[in-house]
Amino acid sequence: MVETEKVRCLIIGSGPAGYTAAIYAGRANLSPVLYEGIQPGGQLTTTTDVENFPGYPQGISGPQLMEDLRTQAERFGADIRFGIATASDLSKAPYKITIDGEKEIEAETLIIATGATAKYLGLEDEKKYAGMGVSACATCDGFFYRKKVVAVVGGGDTACEEAVYLAGLASKVYLIVRKPYLRASKIMQERVLNHDKIEVLFEHNAVGLFGENGVEGVSLVKRWGEPDEERYTLSIDGFFLAIGHKPNSDIFKPYLETDEVGYIITEGDTPRTKVMLPIRITVRQLLLQEVVVKPLLRQSVICLKKDFNNKSIIYKKSGLYCYSAIRFLLITRVKK
């Protein structure tokens, strides 16, 4: 028999969105329970220096920033647990989330901040050499490639950041870029193009990997499909993917509308989704408390249910809200 637990506020995900929601939910006395998911701390734990987060003029490492957020959330009473959400039922309140296929959580309030997972090229060799030279996290595995030759696939900010980080460890870094240009920000492009340890291979596609007991090289195609197409191999010791991410929203898709990638769609400029669910709102002199929920990831979704004692007003309204990195949802509570 599946174990069932009832909670007031359930948060799925432990990236900046999840921890920020936990901080504000805790301060609002909602007794938040947060499940960390498959990657505790989220994607920022795979980042080295974070230089654009307010309050850290000298910068801070990604893992330390997430540890600070976790500590702050726990300070306000957040119950942080390890576990992965494997199924959901958002058809009605209370909202049901299955954890690790074994335990069912019934939540009055549900905040989804599940983040995204790194994409791979889809090569069979990526699976063959997983943990043997193939990685999607330079800061996690870069240490093992000190004074070795590595390749990074991708042309955006993430790929450039990975390449620069690895250049501080490896003897040589090849940046494999499918297009004839970099999509990264100007400052990151300059750092890569001016780095003496980084060589950018424009208009290249990686089509395979080879090696006896691990990655020893990559098979490349230059200007694929063009008259001057060229195929050759390059000796490397490590192969790092940095080509984007897939939103972890699959278990919510039966109830939420998503785009072709998997990001949750909202109505216009509002944080409201197209899912219509009941919210029970109790009003005390029509004055409510101020709560600011500031998730930092685009795919963060929150389902709110307010309960303020005394007289209750129950009505139907959209119950799921989504925040982008620059949006704030303000729910105000004014004192009696």
Image: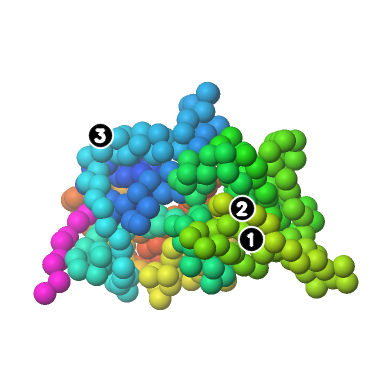
The amino acid at mark 1 is Val
Instruction: Identify the main secondary structure in magenta.
Output: strand
Please tell me which residue lies in front, 324 or 279: 324
Q: Name the residue under label 3.
A: 75
Horizontally, residue 155 falls left or right of residue 242, namely right
- Rate crowding at label 3 as few (under 14), some (14 to 19) or many (20 or more) other CA atoms within 10 Å: few
At horizontal 42% and vertical 70% (from top left) the residue drawn is: 250
In front: 192, or 69?
A: 192
Region rendered in magenta: 1-9
> What amino acid type should be assigned to the residue bearing mark 3?
Arg
SS for dot 2: loop
Horizontal and vertical percent position of residue 292: 40, 42
Give amino acid for label 2: Ile
Classify 285 as above or below 88: above
Label at residue 236? 2
Q: How far apart are marks 1 and 3 (CA)?
A: 48 Å
Quadrant where the image shows the C terminus:
top left
Marks 3 and 2, how far apart in space? 46 Å
Task: Provide residue 147's location: percent of width, then percent of height.
Answer: 57, 39
Q: What element carries label 3?
A: helix
Q: Which residue is drawn at 40% across and 65% down?
A: 318
Q: Can residue 251 be seen in this view?
A: yes
Along the line of sight, the residue nearer the viewer: 130 or 39: 130
Query: Disc 3 or disc 2, which is closer to the eye?
Result: 2
User: What distance separates the C-alpha of mark 1 from that of mark 2?
Assistant: 7 Å
At horizontal 48% and vertical 41% (from top left) the residue drawn is 143
**Residue 243: x and y, percent?**
60, 58
Tell me, yes or no, if residue 314 can be seen here. no
Name the residue beneath numbered marker 1: 218
Residue at the limit of the structure toward the right, as seen here = 227
Q: Are marks 1 and 2 in contact (CB under 8 Å)?
A: yes
